[in-house]
Image (cartoon, rainbow, N blue to C red):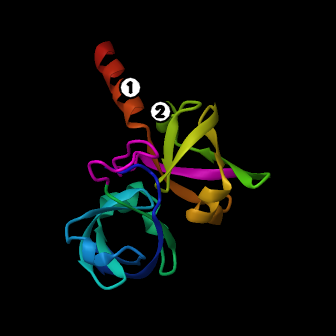
Amino acid sequence: MFTGIITDVGRVLAIAERGDRRLRIATAFATDTIEIGASIACSGVCLTVVEKGADWFAVDVSAETLSKTALAAWRPGTRVNLERALKVGDEMGGHILTGHVDGTAKLVGRREEGGSVRLEFEVPAPLARFIAPKGAVALDGVSLTVNEVSGNRFGVNVIPHTRQMTTLDDLVEDAGVNLETDILARYVARLREMEGA
């Protein structure tokens, strides 16, 4: 489990094809405290550490994950939002995230508002029903509050601190980001489907 509070911005160092895709990611995390098999959210995608060095760790990414996320576009040098898995007793500063990305959202609008920036995203129609005004979403692993919703588009406001501490300020129009909708919205929708069946 994760909270969407980013604690490091890493960088893709290398990519190797080994049946699955292996990514080596530079990090400021103390890698001596990371166990092989640990989960790290990499721009919102929960991935398993399979190898590590003094200032990097490696993860394997399956074809299924590449097909459902923005990771297929990553190249050496790509900046990555990183969050280690939540420990019992840690502060819940964002919202509950699983690291199981629902799909991708596309940036369709951007405007400055003081020191903040307003970002507008478009999502595939099947995911739009899980997004509500004042609800929560995770974009590239960052916990954000939804400001407004119109059809399959929604807007978020990114404050100066979040701009500085994450990769969201790097986004350009038409960029794809990993989207995890609110887990409670998904379960409520599923229960309603089952009641109607």
The image quadrant that residue 148 belongs to is top right
Residue 176, by quadrant, is bottom right
Name the residue: 64% across, 62% down. Answer: 169
Measure the alpha-carbon separation of dots 2 and 1: 8 Å
Q: Is residue 102 magenta?
A: yes
Image location of residue 117, percent across then percent down = 71, 52
Q: Are circles 2 and 1 on residues that touch, CB within 8 Å?
A: yes
**Could you tell me residue 192's position as x and y percent?**
35, 19
Is residue 174 visible in the rendered image? The answer is: no
Which one is earlier in the sequence, the residue at label 2 or at label 1? 2
Q: Which residues are magenta?
A: 86-109
Give the labeled residue for mark 1.
189
Residue 21: image location, x then y, percent: 32, 73
Which SS type dominates the magenta stretch? loop
| Magenta-drawn stretch contains 6 | no
Label 1 CA crowd tier, 10 Å (few <14, some 14–19, many 20+): some
Taking the image as shown, residue 75 lies to the left or right of residue 106, namely left
Amino acid carrying mark 2 in the image: Phe
Q: Residue at x 49, y 56 (%)?
A: 140
Q: Nearest the camera: 70 or 183?
A: 183
Residue 130: image tag? 2
Q: Nearer the viewer, residue 153 or 30?
A: 30
Q: Residue furthest top?
A: 196
In the structure shown, which secondary structural element does the residue marked by tag 2 occupy? loop
Which mark is on residue 155?
none
In the displayed structure, 91 sits above or below 84; it is above
If the image is split into quadrants, where does the C terminus sit?
top left
Which residue is drawn at the image coordinates 20% and 72% (left, top)?
36
Q: At 68% across and 58% down in the image, what residue appears?
A: 173
Q: Secondary structure under badge 1?
A: helix
